Amino acid sequence: MQNISINLKQNEMNFSKKNHEHKNNNKKVVSKKVKLTTTIMVMAFVSLTAMSCKDGKKEESKDTMHSEMNHDESMDHDNMSASNDKMDSNAQNSDAKQVLADYMVLKDALVATEKDEAAKAGKKLESTLKGFDVSSYTAEEQKELKDIIADAIEHAEHIGQSEMDHQREHFKTLSKDIIDMVAITGTDNTLYQQFCPMYDKGSAWLSMNEDIKNPYYGSKMLTCGKVQKEIN
Amino acid sequence: MRIVKLIALVLLVAFVGIQFVPTKRNQSEIVPKTDFLLVNNSPKNISTLLQTSCYDCHSNNTNYPWYNKIQPVTWFLEHHITDGKDELNFNEWENYSNRRKNSKLKSIINQIKDDEMPLWSYTLVHQNASLSESEKTLVIDYMEQIKDSLQ
């Protein structure tokens, strides 16, 4: 569109020059102008139609790409589930391990009241959760895990986009999701389930350290809370 | 002057042109059995409030005023509706697990409390969609009640 209007301006300028030079040729200029206007109208209309068509096509190609990707993913899943069966079933799933690692980065950012760091960690956690392969679990566990993951993805996503107080609100529910996830996946490292009775009628979180560092209030009430449970 | 006229003309042509760009309409006659108001058998006053203030973007049926059928307003709206339904679709309520219902209810309560929903850009043109303080309390209490009944 910009190009068109720039061209227009140039054409206009050319015209006004010509106007001065050939005052006698007024008729010719007028007819030229009509032609120009018609051309512009046609061009604008054609380019708009073309644009709208292109948009439609883009969507189509996106869709096909999507289905191809899904296809690839499902193939990967098949391969992985085959290899997982051979693995030691006691070992914590590597995806679950990564989720916990990302969660801890997020928790530490909230303890430090670092909004941007927390947002970054939220986005990282979101992408890890999206890639979580649950195929090594029993059907019932899979159902539960999928539910937990779907919920956790939403909270992680919001943490990636929000202000500190919202991040903490979402972190509360996210923590519940992760605690429930660990109940299914188990953990290689010892985890401490800690609890702050003050934040939103009482809120829990997970930590690798026994010492309390409160992610809901940060430096305002850093050591407020207690260890509720040790998870091995 | 001629430049101004020509630019105005091009803009006019563009405006007419974009009216032909097809968009998805968010309209459906059917209210599914999974709908929030049906499942919870919500009282009339709550139904009316949610339908006027939330359902345009958080259900499968938008009540479009005439000016929302004109581009580029429709594009702007389409984007909002897709996002809104993605976050929460009241029509799909019963398809959410209890865990997710709980999360959604929490977000509903918080967003209404903080005046983040309904969006100010929405209430700007839909004056009747904005919630008064007493209406806010009514909706929040109702959502709390449903949230408690989940556990």
Image: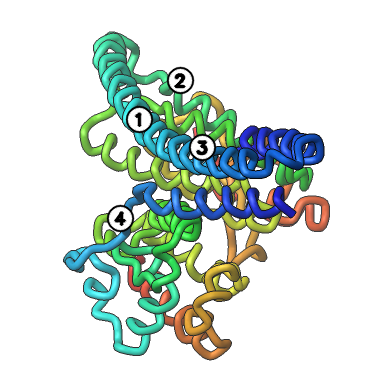
* Left or right: B134 in relation to A88: right
User: Label 2 is placed on what type of residue?
Assistant: Ser
Q: Which residue is mark 4?
A: B96
Per the image, label 3 sits on a secondary structure element best described as helix
The color scheme shown is: rainbow
- For marks 2 and 3, give the CA distance: 63 Å
Instruction: Tell me which numbered mark, 3 or 1, is placed earlier along the sequence.
Output: 3
In this rendered view, identify the residue nearer to me: B24 or B49: B24
Which is in the foreground here, disc 2 or disc 1? 1
- For marks 4 and 1, give the CA distance: 33 Å
Which is in the foreground here, disc 2 or disc 4? 4
- For marks 4 and 3, give the CA distance: 55 Å
Q: Which residue is mark 3?
A: A39
In the rendering, which numbered label is found on residue A57? 1
* Left or right: A217 in relation to B90: right
User: Label 1 is placed on what type of residue?
Assistant: Lys
Which is in the foreground here, disc 4 or disc 1? 1
